[in-house]
Image: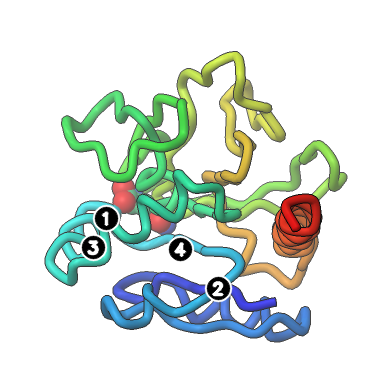
Amino acid sequence: MKIAVLAVQGAFIEHEKMLENLGADCIEIRQKKDAEKAFDGLILPGGESTVMGKLLKELDLFQILKSKIKDGIPVLGTCAGLILLAEKLSNDEQVHFGTLPVTVRRNGYGRQLGSFHTDGHMAGIGTIPMTFIRAPYIEIADPRVEILASVDDKIVAVRYQNQLGTSFHPEVTADTRVHEYFLQMVKDERYRTVNQNIENI
Ligand code: GLN
């Protein structure tokens, strides 16, 4: 199982360490030829979404990754990664991949004082540590989107088909369960596509 981590800016190394601890192979996506390699899942890390969005275009990564997401590759977007996936931003004109039908508020907890840590419940996992760093939150989720976690009435984790998004940073804690949940999504998708190929023989 090979997981690609977008590594143009932000907190990608933490995700890689987490994946390695869980025994998954990872590759870094820094340029177009990396994105053209075969991989089974994709992680969009935290960082600065405007910078990442700009680099995705400049490095010619945008279309190839957007197509993969639309074609169903399991993707985990954390914090800025969630912003990259969102269909709409309530306080920014920009839209990046726009594949996740939610409206996200950038820096939703305030720009400077918006970093905090709490424990919260995530559906399908249980109570987990949640670290928020100048985090966004989800203001509106389309009814097709499954809400996995809310903190103080603000939505902070969602799943929509192959896309998992969190406002917080699961990669900066010692708790591996969000990544395990994501790896299970990747395994399920591989199982589904293998079976589909067998049916087509
Ligand atoms: N505030 C950042 C943004 O809007 C996200 C912060 C993060 O990823 N920790 O892009």
| Mark earlier in primary sequence (4, 2) | 2
In the picture, residue 23 is in which quadrant?
bottom right
| Number of other residues with Cα within 10 Å of mark 3, as a class: few under 14, some 14 to 19, many 20 or more | many
State the separation of the CA atoms marked 4 and 2: 17 Å
State the separation of the CA atoms marked 4 and 3: 13 Å
State the separation of the CA atoms marked 3 and 1: 9 Å
Helix, strand, or loop for circle 2?
A: loop
Residue extending farthest to the top is 143
Residue 83's x, y, as percent? 38, 43
Helix, strand, or loop for circle 4?
A: loop
Amino acid type at circle 3 is Leu
Helix, strand, or loop for circle 3?
A: helix
Of residue 131 and residue 65, the one placed in the foreground of this image is 65
The correct choice, above or below, for 30 with respect to 99 in the image is: below
| Number of other residues with Cα within 10 Å of mark 4, as a class: few under 14, some 14 to 19, many 20 or more | many
| Number of other residues with Cα within 10 Å of mark 2, as a class: few under 14, some 14 to 19, many 20 or more | some
Mark 3 or mark 1, whichever is nearer to me: 1
What residue is pinned by disc 1? 63
State the separation of the CA atoms marked 1 and 4: 18 Å
What residue is pinned by disc 2? 39
| Mark earlier in primary sequence (3, 1) | 3
